[in-house]
């Protein structure tokens, strides 16, 4: 929407389009609130965003630029008596640090290879032309001899041709001759940096790496609110673990357990008995509260194999995690099994950045107004009531509102404490899977337990079926809690699991074509310092270190309830075919129904349980 057309009065102004802010916007718009949703960036989702390869390169360049000094303008002329200003930051806070990029392919290699290929193709074409000329000469000579021969020989040739055609054989002149270059081309084909850039729009690279638990709060919210029809999902097909230098598949479901060749018959029985006993809490489990989960597993007479799978791959816990937390994580894992497949996880097609945009779309359907590259310079606060009455945007327009929702980066840096925790992230583009299989459509979750003082690492490997990378490549995300820089934390593991340099030796490990390392602030570690903010200003923090989205959904629900305690959080939206116009007395709301009809919703997906990409529901 054009800036000059912005109305001057809203119920709620939201700054930032991250997941939490987008859910709040959708929930408020759905119950009839007038929502203005702004973002100073040129893209949606903030630190939850997904980029094409080219877009990611632009983002990296922007992150490496020196921040420009902020100009503080005098907006006092827009205030009234009894009001004061709170200035906001106009630049992103230092939530992203230590960016390092490595490319293991070059355009020069591709150019040399292309030149060699061209010379070989040229030689092959000349040879093919020469063979064709010789064949034509030989054929014409044979034709002359046949014309000069006796009638009986000619008749025998015709009979022979008829017999060959009757048996399904084609005349030799019609049979295509494969060229030597086409036969050897697949073995020479390599992915180059030039190709990554050329096909960069087919990549969807997430800044944050998470998965959706099939019975998690985000999936329940997507289904309840009908937002799931705006997206498609894929089932994560494999749970893997890195152990003793090898990748092993973790048996999760009953079918996986009994099909596993890694476990003995006794271990299979013990594992099934333990998983069954975990469904409900028992007195024995209660007795271990406050004690390490590993101790509880050891006392269950489980071997090293089962302890590793249960601790690191199913509960995804540390050795000193309390038993009650470990069992809660195990139950959450087990409850999500079987809803859409043999693993408990889903992944959105085209990347996690789609989810915030889906909620933004729902907000727009019900009247929310969106402006990217548009910011708010300051808040106007009533001194006596300590409430925000209005905001002043980047064009100097005063916009009245009842509530403000903003991400942490919009606060002045003097009011935000330096994050005490960071996440280390690595994004790799590789040429093959860490565990090759007959199917090239695998989406894998890999757990790497802590070793030698290094933190535990969660790795997600995406195949082209997720629409996040081009055919012939895989997209790998690694995440762990930061000890040092992302490169220091994750590069040793990358070196063990992947090839990062050209090598003449035979090696089955996947090769890394391109990699990015960076540290991201753990959103749960952000704290507001100094003078308390006005009571109607609500702060959203960024992504946390958990694999799921529970924190973001709970945060959004809490903010919504503090704004509208009497309203239902994200009630179901009507299906487009159920919307009926009834003059000005439409029950759904005039603003919402008009927006619904304005958008083309005929191609949106049904809720995840009806999506064929995710398998059959229970």
Image: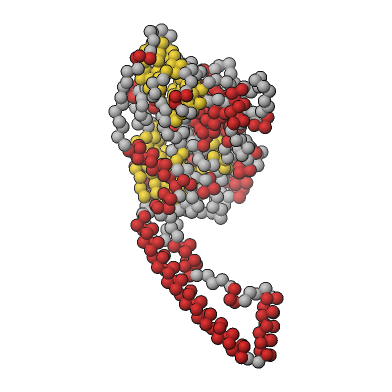
Can residue 553 be seen at all in this image of the molecule?
no
Q: Residue at x 49, y 66 (%)?
A: 182
Q: Nearer the viewer, residue 581 or 170?
A: 581
Q: Residue at x 58, y 73 (%)?
A: 175
User: Residue 371, how many percent across, how many down?
Assistant: 46, 28
Q: Residue at x 54, y 36 (%)?
A: 212
Query: In the rendered image, which quarter contains the C terminus?
Result: top right
Q: Nearer the viewer, residue 229 or 498?
A: 229
* Residue 484 falls in image quadrant: top left
Q: How is the image coloured?
A: secondary structure
* Residue 420 falls in image quadrant: top left
User: Residue 197, how many percent across, how many down?
Assistant: 41, 49
Q: Is residue 259 shown above or below 311?
A: below
Q: Is residue 120 shown above or below 296?
A: below
Q: How many marks?
A: 0
* Residue 361 falls in image quadrant: top right
Q: Is residue 74 left or right of residue 332?
A: left
Q: Nearer the viewer, residue 13 or 408?
A: 13
Q: Is residue 518 shown above or below 535?
A: below
Can residue 201 be seen at all in this image of the molecule?
yes
Q: Nearer the viewer, residue 417 or 42?
A: 42
User: Residue 567, how many percent across, how many down?
Assistant: 58, 18
User: Residue 27, how many percent across, how many down?
Assistant: 55, 24
Q: Residue at x 44, y 35 (%)?
A: 43
Q: Is residue 162 shown above or below 89?
A: below
């Amino acid at each position: 929407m054009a800036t000059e057309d912005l109305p001057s009065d809203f119920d709620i102004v939201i700054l930032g389009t991250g997941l939490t802010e987008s859910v709040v916007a959708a929930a408020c718009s759905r119950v009839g609130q007038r929502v203005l949703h702004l973002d100073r960036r040129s893209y949606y989702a903030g630190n939850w965003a997904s980029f094409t390869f080219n877009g990611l390169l632009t983002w990296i360049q922007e992150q490496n630029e020196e921040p420009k000094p902020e100009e503080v303008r005098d907006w006092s002329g827009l205030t009234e008596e009894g009001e004061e200003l709170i200035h906001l930051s106009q630049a992103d806070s230092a939530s992203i640090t230590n960016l390092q990029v490595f490319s293991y392919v070059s355009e020069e290699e591709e150019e040399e290879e292309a030149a060699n290929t061209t010379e070989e193709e040229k030689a092959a074409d000349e040879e093919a032309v020469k063979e064709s000329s010789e064949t034509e000469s030989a054929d014409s000579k044979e034709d002359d001899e046949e014309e000069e021969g006796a009638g009986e020989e000619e008749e025998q040739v015709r009979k022979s041709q008829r017999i060959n055609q009757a048996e399904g054989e084609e005349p030799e002149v019609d049979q295509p001759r494969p060229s030597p270059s086409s036969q050897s081309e697949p073995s020479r084909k390599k992915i180059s940096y030039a190709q990554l850039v050329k096909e960069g729009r087919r990549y969807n690279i997430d800044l944050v790496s998470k998965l959706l638990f099939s019975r998690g709060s985000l999936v329940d919210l997507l289904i309840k609110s009908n937002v799931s029809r705006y997206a498609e999902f894929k089932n994560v097909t494999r749970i893997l673990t890195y152990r003793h230098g090898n990748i092993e598949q973790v048996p999760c479901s009953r079918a996986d357990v009994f099909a596993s060749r890694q476990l003995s018959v006794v271990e299979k029985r013990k594992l099934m008995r333990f998983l069954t006993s975990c469904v409900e809490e028992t007195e024995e489990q209660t007795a271990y509260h406050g004690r390490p989960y590993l101790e509880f597993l050891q006392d269950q007479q489980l071997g090293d194999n089962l302890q590793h799978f249960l601790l690191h791959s199913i509960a995804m816990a540390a050795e000193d995690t309390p038993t009650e937390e470990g069992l809660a994580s195990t139950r959450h894992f087990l409850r999500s099994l079987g809803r859409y497949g043999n693993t408990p996880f889903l992944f959105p097609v085209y990347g996690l950045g789609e989810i915030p945009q889906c909620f933004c779309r729902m907000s727009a359907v019900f009247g929310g107004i969106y402006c990217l590259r548009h910011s708010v310079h300051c808040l106007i606060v009533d001194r006596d009531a300590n409430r925000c009455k209005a905001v002043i945007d980047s064009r100097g327009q005063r916009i009245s509102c009842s509530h403000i929702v903003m991400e942490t980066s919009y606060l002045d840096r003097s009011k935000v404490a330096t994050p005490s925790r960071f996440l280390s992230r690595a994004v790799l583009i590789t040429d093959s899977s860490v565990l090759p299989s007959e199917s090239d459509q695998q989406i894998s979750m890999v757990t790497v337990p802590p070793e030698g003082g290094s933190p535990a690492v969660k790795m997600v490997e995406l195949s082209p079926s997720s629409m996040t990378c081009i055919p012939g490549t895989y997209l790998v995300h690694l995440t762990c809690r930061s000890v040092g820089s992302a490169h220091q934390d994750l590069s040793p593991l990358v070196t063990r699991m992947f090839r990062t340099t050209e090598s003449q030796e035979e090696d089955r490990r996947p090769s890394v074509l391109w990699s990015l390392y960076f540290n991201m602030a753990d959103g749960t570690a952000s704290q507001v310092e100094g003078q308390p903010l006005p009571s109607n200003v609500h702060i959203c923090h960024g992504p946390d270190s958990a694999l799921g989205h529970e924190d973001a959904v709970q945060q959004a629900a809490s903010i919504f309830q503090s704004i509208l305690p009497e309203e239902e959080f994200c009630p179901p939206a009507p299906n487009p075919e159920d919307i009926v116009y009834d003059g000005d007395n439409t029950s759904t709301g005039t603003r919402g129904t008009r927006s619904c009809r304005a958008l083309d919703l005929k191609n949106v997906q049904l809720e995840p349980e009806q999506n064929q990409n995710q398998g059959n529901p229970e």
